[in-house]
Amino acid sequence: MIDNESNGVVSRPILIFPGGMPRSLEYLKKCLRDGQSVIGASSLEYDVSRDKYPEWLYLPYITHSDFDKALKLAIIGFNIAGVYSPNIVVWNYLDRVLKEIAPSIALVNTSPVNAELAGYRTAQSHAHALIKNPLPLSVKEIAKPSISEIELSALFRHADLIPGMCDHEKLCVLCEIARYSPCGDVVEIGSWWGKSAFILARLAHCYNIGNLLCVDPWSNEHLVQNDEKGLVDSGSAQVDAEEALMVFEMNILPYDFNHINYLRMPSVEGAKHYGKHKNATTASFGSTNYSGHIAILHIDGNHSYAAAKADIVSWGHFVVKGGWIIFDDYIWPYGDGPQRVGDEFLADNHANIDVAFVMGSALFVQIAS
Ligand SMILES: C[S@@+](CC[C@H](N)C(=O)[O-])C[C@H]1O[C@@H](n2cnc3c(N)ncnc32)[C@H](O)[C@@H]1O
């Protein structure tokens, strides 16, 4: 028996079977982190994953007549508390057979079918809800017809797979304003791992808006925001901007229809480059031309007042009539930079603004058409 003591509680082991599947290895890591004892098992004579486990045993294939007996012996011999299986066929078999051979032992995970499909089902229900109840924007223009429910579901699902800072409310508004967007470039200041960039790239493509330009220095130096309590800055100090660019490229490249590129530079420098060259060229995305007129400007760079102000001053004048500006983190618990800049923009330009509203934590502004 391989019981271990943690916080005075004796933990009986969980059997992970088959132990070599990617989900099994993820679960193994979680158990080891939590101090939960585990035993891996496989029906292969030699399984390359066995060395990753603190304990290991061989079990026959579930189709073999000896399987039930071998499993029962293992449960008794190792005092097993539960079984984890990400394999759909094995899970179904164990769900039935455990009730007969070891009624006090249960599977610790829900059906792998439900687990794998949960994210798709959620995406589909979000898409369904948005199509049934589009956000009531008081915009003068007539909206383009929405992309289909399956396209919207795909957008929600894939956005969910990219880590980052774009909440559900903001995602829904982006989907809606894209329907009211004129043609032109879509520019994002601050892309990090590419979550909102993916959403903008997809919408720009689906609604024929234009090409996407991401402007971000991806440098640790530019992550410093001087936030009020230093909480953001101490978190940023633990991330690697070089790696973030690699992650951005891994996330965005599969969605590129020759309509996405980036400038690896701070936004003020990026605006000068954009105005002069109307082009971005990178090894991974090739060469992309831009119109020099912006349909959607997403400001999500450094949130200090000075940086956010410089973003809108450098880029705002490129936005066309009827175009949109999004001030991200207008509501931000760590400082008021984006809010002060957004409010000043509204005060200075009220005669030239058709629509302005806050949704989620972002301020959305439509320039008068
Ligand atoms: C909050 S993250 C962006 C999150 C991203 N939009 C998302 O949806 O996940 C802020 C980004 O702004 C970038 N940044 C910082 N200073 C900048 C500047 N002066 N110009 C452009 N980007 C900047 C940082 O490198 C970082 O990637």
Image: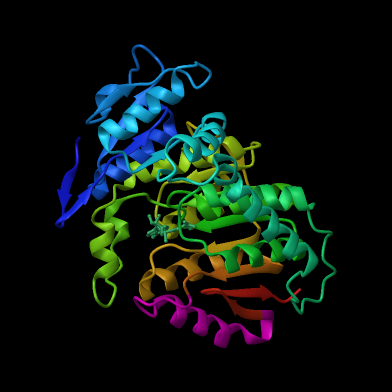
* Residue 71 vertical position relative to residue 325 in the rendered view, above or below: above
Q: Position of residue 94 (x, y in %)?
A: 50, 34
User: In the figure, is residue 338 to the left or right of 352?
Assistant: left
Seen at 46% across and 78% down, the residue is 331
Q: Quadrant of the N terminus?
A: top left
* Residue 91 vertical position relative to residue 167 in the rendered view, above or below: above
Seen at 65% across and 51% down, the residue is 121
Foreground: 125 or 10?
Answer: 10
Foreground: 52 or 342?
Answer: 52
What range is drawn magenta here?
A: 330-355
Seen at 54% across and 31% down, the residue is 93
Q: Quadrant of the C terminus?
A: bottom right
View quadrant of ligand 1: bottom left
Q: Main secondary structure of the magenta part?
A: helix
Foreground: 361 or 129?
Answer: 129
In the rendered image, the residue lying farthest to the top is 45
Residue 181 visible: no
Quadrant of the rendered structure where residue 292 is? bottom right
* Residue 80 vertical position relative to residue 201 in the rendered view, above or below: above
Seen at 57% across and 69% down, the residue is 326
* Residue 337 vertical position relative to residue 15 in the rendered view, above or below: below
Residue 239 visible: yes
Asked whether residue 246 is drawn in magenta, I would say no
Q: Position of residue 157 (x, y in %)?
A: 61, 49
Asked whether residue 346 is drawn in magenta, I would say yes
Q: Position of residue 347 (x, y in %)?
A: 56, 88
